[in-house]
Amino acid sequence: MSGVLLWVVSPKENANSLLSLMPRIGSPRRSKLCSRLTFSTGVLAYSGAVAHPVRSSEEMVYEVVLKQAALVREQSRVKERALDLDERIETDGLSNWDLLNQAYDRCGEVCAEYAKTFYLGTLLMTPERRRAVWAIYVWCRRTDELVDGPNASYITPKALDRWEKRLTDLFEGRPYDMYDAALSDTVSKYPVDIQPFKDMVEGMRLDLRKSRYQNFDELYLYCYYVAGTVGLMSVPVMGISPESKASTETVYNAALALGIANQLTNILRDVGEDARRGRVYLPQDELAQAGLSDDDIFRGKVTEKWKMFMKGQIKRARMFFDEAEKGVSELNSASRWPVWASLLLYRQILDAIEANGYDNFTKRAYVGKAKKLVSLPVAYGRAVIGPSKLTQQLVSR
């Protein structure tokens, strides 16, 4: 939780499990994107050699984006007043504000443990936004661990069905535990739609039955499910700057691009790790075009063909990061720093892959502490610049 990201921190950022949060959770996932991308009128559009179905994945995802943007417009000024918990939460033992505050505090502790840099940035947000972001982060991480933790062998399609039913219940004010209670409270205050949450669960279902993706269209949808959804969940909480002149759809598309960029970065970083699990999260048609196959990945040798292939993948990921930057600058001023910090740090993983000579079979690309420390003030500097000014700078570079 890429990307998460929440919008910005992929839930897979840390390999440690959340056994303290769920009794059974667990198997892997990532994603990947493909060739020529064009961005027009705020809509992510893809044009490539892949044959499209009647409705492409981008078209399907954009329908969700439009729905989310409409929700925000309906509540352009979110009421950040506290609602009486008894009206929404009916489970025993969670009927007062003290327990709800404890639930939010525990979500904050989880975020601090598994997404340290992002957590630091959230401390600049208003208390209400900060707590809401923590609640979303924890739900995303718990969901991610359903198929990417030590208990993956216990997870079945029926188990995911039960998790989705539990999601529906908490959206209707019937949380199962303290973490659900925090999210239930959050979605009652902000224009957050349930669809991106359901779509993330759908991404988990894909991981139970699919370990290869034939083309970009398949992978784009998967990437949306497991990472792009985080952006759609988070933007309503983070808020859009009153100074922003961008359309709501444009900001949501940028959030989607950042989730995709983070997820693609995960894939490129973890090629070797995935291969050892028998998984290849790279489009089969692009591998074939490069003269490569799954066998080449399983052998794990860095050849000239592999280097050329990786250069193309990294270039594409950076295109998504570039598109995402435009949206970060449009966020509410108090919400920009954690997003900028994560974006800049995640982008540097691509630099690390290059520095490793494109060996992502045996070497894990990471950003060292020194670079992280340097990135934080840079991210803060970008965060304090108003949306219109920064957007102009990014477009003109």
Image: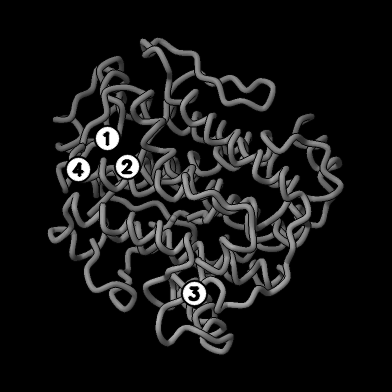
Label whose residue precedes the other's in the sequence (1 or 3): 3
| Direction from residue 322 to residue 139 in the image, left or right | left
For label 1, count other residues whose C-alpha is less than 10 Å away and answer few (under 14), some (14-19) or many (20+). some
* Three-letter residue code for mark 3: Ile
C-alpha distance separating marks 4 and 2? 13 Å
Residue 258, how many percent across, how many down?
55, 42
**Residue 44 visible (yes or no):** yes
> Image point 74% across, 46% down: which residue?
329
Q: Secondary structure at mark 3?
A: loop
> Image point 63% across, 34% down: which residue?
323
Give the labeled residue for mark 4. Answer: 275
Label whose residue precedes the other's in the sequence (4 or 2): 4
Which mark lies nearer to you, 4 or 2?
4
* Three-letter residue code for mark 4: Ala
- Quadrant in the rendering for residue 395: top right
> Image point 56% across, 46% down: which residue?
232
Q: Quadrant of the C terminus?
A: top right
Asked whether disc 2 touches disc 1, contact meaning CB atoms under 8 Å apart, the reply is yes
* Three-letter residue code for mark 1: Val
C-alpha distance separating marks 2 and 1? 6 Å
Q: Secondary structure at mark 1?
A: loop
Image vertical order of residue 204 relative to residue 216, above or below: below
Q: Secondary structure at mark 2?
A: loop
Label whose residue precedes the other's in the sequence (2 or 3): 3
Give the labeled residue for mark 2. Answer: 359
> How is this picture coloured?
one colour
Give the labeled residue for mark 3. Answer: 89
C-alpha distance separating marks 4 and 3? 44 Å
